[in-house]
Every structure is written in structure tokens, then in C-alpha cells.
């Protein structure tokens, strides 16, 4: 009966105890709390494509000293900037002022001498002569409009090579291939460099004091018009032959100069051509000027009254006038000693525009001097022999030096070949043969040394 009631689930039964092994396996989890489901906040229903707005809480931003610059700084923090910024402004201002000042000086020189260049040369400047306009031709006629004294001098004649150097170029004249002019001015845009150069020139004799000067160099044709003047067509060639047929632009090569005595020392050190001349004072020249010449006859021919008057008028602004056919630097090879006839003039620039009147006569004399050389610089045979002898002596020294260099090169080449032959012979020998060979070389060297010692004794 009990079994039947148990089968029907009506009977009360006591639970059977669990085994000890199962309780031991889950003892670590006995005190753990029961897991609870995560709470999900309700989402507002969204209609269409829009989303529900979520309110945000607006908080006020608190500004600290990091944002308030006037609270975390003081004027003492800007002492360095207060010194550096004015210095930069001053340097930039001096740079701009210096460049503009140099341009004004260059234009002032061009205004004073541009007319003389236009009168003597067909093409002045890198852009050439400015042609007359149609209005000028209609008002004054073609002949007068194209006259040299009526053509305006353009400011573009001078080219600014650097901030303190301006150059120009002229060509299209009889007896002169071309003319180079360079204006060297103070480095006003860089006062520190200018002051340093002045100080160094005061303490060191080898450093030349900075000065504003004009240096002009005219290169003579010397009878080579056909080689130097370009020809575009056969018709131009025929016209050129007819134009140069009766001209004689060549003259005897020589070195002659009139220099200021203050410039004589560095000219002798810097220029090789003047080292061939002798220095002698001339009674007609001022006491501060002297003549450097290869012959007294050359001085008598070139030192004309017009040149003496022009040098006296220039005064201390005059530096030198040089006529030469030798290179500036001492030639090392024979091809460097090729004669190149040229004329050089150096004049210091005056402080004001009105002072250019003192150097006008000297500059004009320099522009016309190639014509005088082509007509009169043909000396007696005795003078020519003296000039030729000086140049042949210099060429002889160059040939001797060149032969010495070639002989040294031949000796070095011979020694190199001998060494290669000796090394190749030693490689083909056995150890015993090499030892005997080296002993024979040592004996020969000792015998040569003994002979030298006996000769000296």
C-alpha cells in the first residue's frame, strides 16, 4: 500500500542527503549573490526618420588665468622682445635705405656721364640705344631726332649686379671693341660689414680701405675687327670689308700709366703688368701723381697738356689711368701671356652731383684715347726692340718653367714604369732569387751614395 501511494505521489517523503563530494565542488559559489537582469531604460518611440531629442544640461565655463593673459603676464616678460624688435626694425630700415641710396648715386653718375657715352658709342647699356619716337621725328626731323645729344639717357643703362655694384656696357665705336664700366659703392645696406672693413683697413696694410669708385676698361680692336665684329650675311661682310679697309686700329704694345701715389703700392702688388715698368716723377704732373712707363719716349708721347690738365682737375678723385697689353695676373703658362691691349681708368666718386664737373674732362679724354693710340703709338725701332726684349725675356722664363715641369713629369713617368717592371720581375722569382735581387739593389745604392760623398769631399 505504501509503495502504491508513493507511486501516486501522495505519500510524504523526507529528502535524501546529497553526497559530500558534490557539496565540496560547489563550495566556492555558496556565498555568491544571485545574478540580476540588467535594467533597460525605455526608448521613446521614433516616428518617421527623426530621432527623439535628448535634453542636455548647460554648464557654465570657468575662465582661469590661463585664458586671462593680463593676469598671468607682466611687462617684465617682454624685455627681450622690446630689445630685439626695434633692432630688427632698424636693420631692415638701414638695409632698405642703403640700397635706395646706392641706386640714387648710380643714377646720379649716369646722369652726369651718360651723355658722353651716348655721343661716343652707338650702343650703350645691355638694352641698346633707345630709338626716337614717331612724334620726335615728325616734330624735329629724323636727322635731329637721331642725333646723340638729343637721345634721352635711359635709367636702364646701368644694371644692378649686387646691392653695392652696378655695371654697364658700351660698343659700336671705331678702334674700340667694347667698354666695360663698373661702379663700386659702399655697403650702406650692411653697416656692420662696412665698419669692419674700415677697421681692418686701418690696422692691416694688406686690406684696401673701402671707397666708392668708377672703373672703366676699354678693349682695343688692335686690327682684329673682322674677327670680333659679327657678320650675319654676305652683304654685311662686303660692307664691313669696305668700312674697315682704310682703317688702322693697331698700335705697338706697351705698358704705361699715370697713377696717384697712394695707389701705387697696391697696384704694383696686385697687377703683374705694372711690374714691368719703372716709376719716375714728372715735372708737369702734380706732386701727388707719378708716371709708370717702360720708356721715356712713351711718356713724352702720351703725357699731353690735355691729360695733365684733366688729372689736375680731378685731384684726389683720380686713382689711375693705365694703358697695357699684358695680363693683370702673372702668367703661369705660355697661352696666358697672349697680349690683350686695353685701357683702364679708375676715379673715386665725389660726394655730391656738382663735384662731377672735376672729372668730366678726364673721362672724356679716356673715351677718345684709343683714337690717339691708333694714330700716334708707333715708336722708333729702338723703342720697339726694348719693348720686345722685355716680353721675350718673360716668355723665356715661362718656357723654362714649362720645360722644367715637363721634365719632372717625364721623370716621374719613367720612375713609375721602372717600379712596375721591378715589381713584375719580383713576382716571377722564387724566395731565394728575390733575396739575391734585393741584395744587389742594396749594393748598387750603397755604391752610388759613396760616389756622391766622394764628389762632395
Image (spheres, rainbow, N blue to C red):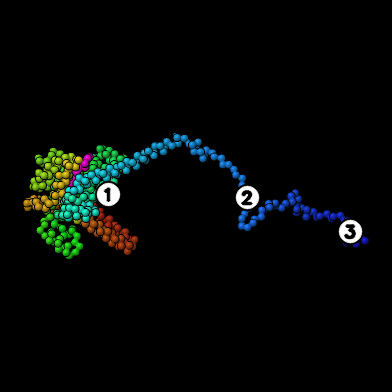
In magenta stretch: residue 136: no
Q: Is residue 99 above or below residue 175?
A: above
Q: Which label sits in the foreground, 1 or 3?
A: 1
Asked whether the viewer can see residue 235, the reply is: yes
The residue identified by callout 3 is 10
> In this view of the protein, which residue sits in the foreground, 268 or 370?
370
Q: Position of residue 234 (x, y in %)?
A: 17, 65
Looking at the image, is mark 3 or mark 2 earlier in the sequence? Answer: 3
> Disc 1 designates what residue?
161
Magenta residues (range): 345-353
Looking at the picture, how far across and down is residue 328, in whole percent?
19, 49
Report, in whole angstroms, how far the alpha carbon at label 1 lies from the one at label 3: 125 Å
Q: Is residue 37 left or right of residue 97?
A: right
Local crowd size for mark 3, using a 10 Å CA cut-off: few (<14), some (14–19), many (≥20): few
Q: Which mark is residue 333?
A: none
Which element type, helix, strand or loop, lies under badge 2? Answer: loop
Characterize the local packing of mark 2: few (<14), some (14-19) or many (20 or more) Cα atoms within 10 angstroms. few
Q: Residue furthest right?
A: 1
Q: Residue furthest front?
A: 139
Amino acid at each position: 500500500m505504501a509503495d502504491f501511494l508513493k507511486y501516486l505521489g501522495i505519500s510524504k517523503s523526507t529528502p535524501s542527503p546529497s553526497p559530500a563530494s558534490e557539496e565540496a565542488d560547489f563550495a566556492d559559489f555558496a556565498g555568491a549573490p544571485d545574478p540580476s537582469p540588467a535594467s533597460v531604460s525605455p526608448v521613446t518611440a521614433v516616428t518617421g526618420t527623426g530621432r527623439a531629442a535628448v535634453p542636455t544640461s548647460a554648464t557654465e565655463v570657468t575662465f582661469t588665468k590661463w585664458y586671462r593673459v593680463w593676469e598671468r603676464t607682466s611687462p617684465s616678460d617682454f624685455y627681450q622682445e622690446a630689445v630685439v624688435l626695434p633692432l630688427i626694425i632698424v636693420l631692415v630700415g638701414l638695409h632698405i635705405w642703403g640700397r635706395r641710396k646706392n641706386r640714387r648715386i648710380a643714377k646720379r653718375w649716369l646722369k652726369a656721364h651718360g651723355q658722353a657715352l651716348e655721343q661716343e658709342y652707338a650702343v650703350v647699356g645691355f638694352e641698346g640705344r633707345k630709338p626716337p619716337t614717331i612724334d620726335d621725328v615728325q616734330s624735329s626731323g629724323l636727322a635731329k631726332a637721331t642725333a646723340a645729344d638729343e637721345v634721352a639717357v635711359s635709367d636702364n643703362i646701368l644694371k644692378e649686379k649686387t646691392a653695392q655694384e652696378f655695371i654697364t656696357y658700351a660698343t659700336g665705336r671705331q678702334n674700340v671693341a667694347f667698354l666695360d664700366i663698373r661702379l663700386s659703392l659702399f655697403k650702406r645696406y650692411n653697416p656692420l660689414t662696412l665698419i669692419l672693413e674700415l677697421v681692418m683697413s686701418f690696422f692691416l696694410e694688406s686690406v684696401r680701405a673701402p671707397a666708392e669708385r668708377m672703373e672703366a676698361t676699354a678693349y682695343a680692336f688692335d686690327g682684329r675687327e673682322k674677327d670680333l665684329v659679327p657678320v650675319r650675311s654676305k652683304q654685311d661682310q662686303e660692307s664691313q670689308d669696305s668700312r674697315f679697309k682704310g682703317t688702322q686700329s693697331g698700335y705697338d704694345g706697351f705698358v704705361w700709366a699715370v697713377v696717384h701715389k697712394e695707389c701705387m703700392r697696391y697696384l704694383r702688388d696686385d697687377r703683374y703688368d705694372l711690374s714691368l715698368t719703372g716709376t719716375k716723377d714728372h715735372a708737369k704732373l702734380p706732386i701727388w701723381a707719378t708716371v709708370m712707363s717702360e720708356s721715356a719716349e712713351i711718356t713724352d708721347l702720351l703725357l699731353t697738356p690735355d691729360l695733365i690738365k684733366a688729372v689736375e682737375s680731378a685731384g684726389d678723385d683720380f686713382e689711375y689711368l693705365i694703358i697695357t697689353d699684358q695680363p693683370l695676373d702673372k702668367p703661369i703658362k705660355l697661352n696666358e701671356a697672349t697680349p690683350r691691349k686695353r685701357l683702364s681708368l679708375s676715379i673715386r666718386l665725389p660726394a655730391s652731383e656738382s663735384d662731377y664737373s672735376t672729372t668730366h674732362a678726364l673721362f672724356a679724354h679716356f673715351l677718345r684715347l684709343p683714337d690717339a693710340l691708333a694714330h700716334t703709338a708707333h715708336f722708333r725701332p729702338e723703342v720697339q726692340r726694348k719693348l720686345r726684349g722685355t716680353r721675350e725675356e718673360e716668355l723665356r722664363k715661362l718656357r723654362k718653367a714649362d720645360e722644367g715641369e715637363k721634365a719632372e713629369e717625364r721623370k716621374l713617368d719613367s720612375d713609375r714604369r721602372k717600379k712596375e717592371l721591378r715589381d713584375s720581375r719580383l713576382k716571377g722569382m722564387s724566395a731565394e732569387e728575390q733575396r739575391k735581387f734585393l741584395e744587389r739593389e742594396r749594393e748598387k745604392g750603397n755604391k752610388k751614395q759613396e760616389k756622391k760623398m766622394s764628389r762632395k769631399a
